[in-house]
Image (cartoon, coloured by chain):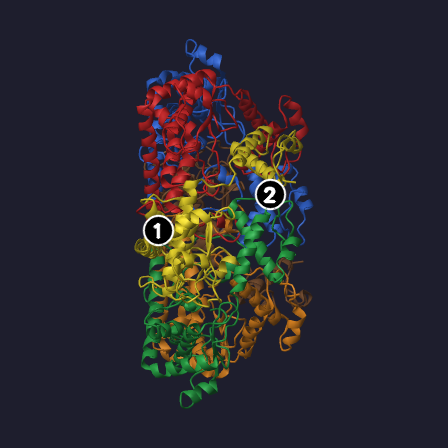
Chain colours: A green, B orange, C brown, D blue, E red, F yellow
């Protein structure tokens, strides 16, 4: 059932593949076939042959071997630092959602840890100040890594950077929040992208594209800088949270409060992006 | 029924998902499955697996928790300001449609409030003056926020900016209303975009694209400036309408008239855009 | 029958919608469903829900209210001016088709009026002089509005501008009628655009695109200027035709002749574009 | 049977249309429906309604009225001049195919006349000299019009320009026949364009695109200049062939020979482009 | 059976077409219908009509008449020169595959002659030196024509240029073989082009595209220059092989050896490109 | 069964092809048909004819003849050098995965040899230092060839260059690892590329594209330089491993250790890229 849509050369038998790969579950087999199809495509072949499957099994088996999903102590420490950065900045800026839980238990495939913030109600609109706070929280993981590892950053912030960049670009092109690009919007409306009408061309010039790049970069760098400054001034709290997190793997809001010597003061509880921003 | 078109890995059972999410309605389940498909796609997987669904349930549940759809007092005040801006400018410019109702009751997913204007008859054509009035009304919500919140604007104007930008670009590229771009039209005719013929390339140069950007930006900024000036000169009326709106949530034309001390004078009732402009 | 191709969320019932919208005909219902689908897409939803339909009904009903399709006196006057411009220039240039009827009765959705010119036979080719006359006639509606309304133009000329621009671009890129771009053609052949072969890239440089823009703009502006000059010199005839048209709504060739004091002299009857130009 | 693929609004009845258009044949009806679909699309409507059909009938009927397909004397004279240009240059350059027939009887929709040249055998390759002769013949129609009409050219050369331009671009980008672009090829191989693989981007820079434009333009202009010079020096023969053609509408090779006072000397009979050039 | 997928207007009968074209085989009929569809598309028509078929028959018949597929003596001489160039350079550079057969018998539609080189074993990798030899052999046909015909080149080298250009571009963008572009690769991986994922944009700048153009051009021109120098220094052998080839149409390796006065020395037998290069 | 999707001209019989190609297996036949379809497409034909098949058989047979898949001694030596480069650099940088096996036995179609490195556990994130080590290992094959062959590099490093380039571009555009491009991300998110939504335009300017090119090039060139320096300083080990590999074709980690005079010291075992990087 995993080879639908993939042409197999005559004589190639998926049963044999299954028999030779006893340790694999269904999804692994699917990966084998996909990998083999990729190899066949690279060869310029029209169909998957036995040798493609053999090489694919090698590759997937190798991959499975390393899927133990246990972080090394060094990794745990870095992830703890990263998440502590999110938590401490979220506790420091005026408009971020209250922190609900910080954790370094890997969840899903991309997330190594997470800082859950639980808004008390739906936000209908977000001001520029609130968006800047949100950006600072998003980029605080990277800022913490910069601080704790002498600037040697990691891939762990890739998702944060992507979300922050998307938001910064929207501030420039959708929300009219920069002096330079003004209140004009740029690019296809979001709604239009989902309608199967026709592919319209990019509706702005290359100079405008450069201005958008520069403004979005400035917004992201400013937020990163701000997160860095907050964490520098609250370095001891950052270290404390990171250390505790590395030890206990997960901290609730109450535990965070106790750890930081008293309830972190209540602030406006409102920062998640409304659906049309996400 | 919500997982059509999404491949599920063997062993993944939607019944179980439904059983574990008693508080969710059909559409929420669909969102869970979509979210899971997105997560699976991010992993590079071909099919949705149990862990994708689990993480997706977490995310959606979090989202539902905040869907109370009650605005905070601060939000209500800002939306009231925003809508009051639309209403006061609509009452001030010579060619806008008469205001029928102003409201800050959220409607649909994007609209936080609305200012309904009811034209008395279909408009067959619109002059440049009428379009400029329309733009000023469209951008008055943002101008009111700038005025009332010391320039700290919000995402609440995103739809207004998009509509105003689309109209400004049409004034430049379709209606021949600028000196610089002249009476030539630019880009595919609107009608052609809906015909499944072939994707033609953008039919103008990058220099022309820059000129279009600059002219459309100027038109939008001028309209925003004009709305700002009107609201500055009628600041007291703006405050009055905003305050009343925050209190009563909805105002009819009659209530607006009573509030502003007399019937707002009748003007030409004609401003909605004809269908080929929308 | 109007919701084909649009996914409806469970529990959403089109019968109920029809029941609630007694004043709507079939096409209006289709518009409701389309509008709702658009709203759902904006929400990021997979299916149309009840609230989308409700908001859509509001919007469409509002639209219908203004579809009285009766022009205001001000509009009628402007359209009469616009069409009189087409007619007077068509009667003045040497190569335009003879005018058959001028009318300000709206026809279809876009046309507010029309100036029917009836060629006596198919034209097989058009000279540069004939094309220039055709362009002057096309742009005469706008020129008349400029003249009669102190330069405050309207959206009423949008279709004229689009057709004139398309023709001007063809003169530059297909017919080799400019010194600067020479006898080379630019862009995909028209025929190729209708064949489902493959999407070829734009086959000329950005500098060439700019030259095409500049030459096409010059051609259109020259034609507009020429129409303007003709109408300035025949201002009294323009006013007479416009006034009579506003009063009687439609004028035949004979009525035009009587109005202008004698048969407008016969000229070569040949100006409609051949099919490969349209 | 002509409305397949076009959605009709409820209540719209094609039988009625057919009944109202007795003079139309099947293809005309198809055109009516297509025209109506276009009008509906312009309105933004999902289906064709009665008013669309009515307006479409008006338009098509107007079109049919002029489809008498008889050229005016002025047109005949110009087409005769145009074709005589092709014939005389074909008889003058060393490598063109022998002329078989010259005619000004319209054939098909685009061709107003034709100059048939019958190669005696398939050409396997073409030298740069032969291509230059071919280009001169292709552009001789336009050159003849320039000569005979004081530079006032017409749309009649559009197909010639397109074919000449395509060939000139191939000389630059496929055949390595310019110093400046050298022996490198540019753009997707012709064969690849017909394979449903994937859309590759344009594989050269904008500077290179400009160089291609300039070189192709130079080649076409040189060929046009050459045709012009040949026709200037053989002006009397051009006039003679054009006059005879206007009178008799079609001339065979023998008639051409008699007209020009003796057999036009036999030359290498080889000029049609091989299939991979077309 | 040849008109599948092409809409025929009512009253158009393919049987009649078949009856009128007794000399045509099935494939010719298919060509007639395709040609007619193209003509109809050019007219903007929805369906093929009788007049389209008539004109198409004319065109195809004309084409068939010249498909005698016999080269003229002049063509034979040029093709012989061209192939002799390939053979002599292949025998001169250190790393080319051994020549197996040289022929001027047309094969397929594009190849006028061919120089078969038979590698003794699969090549797993190719060095920069070997690629440069391969390029010199590829471009030797054109270099021979330049030499033998005073620089008047022909379309006969089009396929050679295309293959050489593709290889030169790969040396720049895939194999990291230039100083200027370094070891970075540019553009989509070859494998990705065959996967129906999504159309990614060109991933490099216009400046980079220009550098690629310039480097690829330099590589191709250098190879052409090298082939030219080799052939200049071995002019007598070139003439001898070309003359013999024109006479006998095909030469085996043994015949080549005898002709050139002794066995051409054995060299490394390895030059065909590996599959991932083709 | 191999000609599905390819139109065959009437009279063309695949059975005959099969009969004439006794030495071919099913996949070879498929290649013949595909090759023939390509040839037909080049001819502009709609269907595959006998002559296409004949020429295709010639080509494929030629290809099969050389598929002996035995490397020459010169090739073996170069591949051994290349793989020894990977192994020695992997043993030298602090963060690379431990080498498990080095081999010059061709595997699959592209890989001439391989250096298997077996991570002991899944890596959840990678630091900039670790990525730089990974890049140095990836590029060590090319560096070894430069060292051992006086700078005459080969196509053997094509896959290495592609993977290193993809990683370097991600460091610039996804991981925010350069000063110049900052923490902003560029281009569509990876996840979005797999969703069949809509083709969004490249979301950055040409200047930004150039900066990305320059930074990615710098990263790759630095890594290549670093690999070169490591191999220069460990030249004797490189030679030893290459020689042994050429002799024995495959070396395990233990054999490598013995060869290099003692266990290569244990280092952090962690270098394979996480799935979201591949």
Helix, strand or loop at label 2? It is helix
Quadrant of the image for the N terminus of chain E? top right
> Is B44 positioned to the left or the right of F143 in the image?
right
Q: Is residue F136 above or below residue B267?
A: above
Compare residues C202 and A219 and report the one nearer the observer.
A219
Comparing F176 with F263, the one in front is F263
- Residue A215 lies, with reference to residue C249, above or below; the image says below
Query: Is residue A249 visible to us here?
Result: yes
Residue B121 seen anywhere in this rendered image of the structure: no
Residue lying at the far bottom in this picture: please name it: A262
Tag in front: 2 or 1: 1
Q: Quadrant of residue C152?
A: bottom left
Q: Dot 1 falls on which chain?
A: F
Where is residue D118? Give x, y as percent. 50, 19
**Residue tagged 2:** D32
Tell me residue A212's x, y (percent).
36, 61
Tally of numbered tags: 2
Vertical arrangement, residue C137 with respect to residue A63, above or below: above
Report how far apart the C-alphas of labels 2 and 1 lie in the structure: 70 Å
Q: Tell me the residue that label 1 is attached to.
A: F143
- Location of residue E258 in the rendering, given as x and y in whole percent from the top left corner: 42, 18
């Amino acid at each position: 059932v995993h080879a639908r849509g993939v042409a197999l050369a005559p004589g190639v038998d998926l049963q044999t593949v299954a028999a030779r790969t006893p340790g694999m579950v269904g999804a692994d087999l699917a990966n084998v076939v996909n990998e083999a199809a990729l190899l066949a495509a690279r060869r310029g072949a029209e169909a998957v042959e036995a040798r493609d499957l053999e090489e694919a099994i090698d590759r997937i088996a190798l991959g499975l071997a390393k899927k133990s999903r246990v972080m090394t102590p060094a990794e745990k420490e870095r992830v703890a630092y990263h998440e502590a950065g999110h938590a401490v900045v979220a506790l420091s800026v005026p408009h971020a959602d209250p922190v609900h839980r910080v954790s370094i238990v890997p969840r899903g495939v991309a997330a190594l840890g997470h800082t859950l913030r639980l808004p008390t109600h739906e936000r209908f609109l977000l001001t520029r100040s609130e968006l800047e706070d949100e950006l600072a929280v998003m980029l605080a993981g990277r800022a913490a890594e910069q601080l704790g590892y002498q600037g040697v950053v990691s891939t762990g912030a890739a998702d944060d950077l992507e979300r922050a960049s998307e938001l910064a670009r929207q501030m420039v092109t959708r929300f009219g929040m920069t002096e330079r690009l003004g209140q004009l919007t740029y690019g296809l409306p979001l709604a239009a992208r989902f309608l199967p009408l026709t592919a319209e061309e990019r509706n702005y010039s290359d100079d405008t594209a450069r201005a958008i790049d520069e403004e979005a970069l400035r917004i992201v760098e400013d937020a990163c800088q701000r997160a860095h400054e907050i964490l520098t001034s609250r370095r001891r709290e950052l270290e404390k949270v990171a250390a505790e997190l590395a030890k206990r793997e997960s901290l609730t809001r109450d535990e965070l409060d106790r750890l930081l010597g008293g309830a972190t003061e209540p602030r406006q509880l409102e920062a998640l992006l409304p659906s049309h921003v996400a």
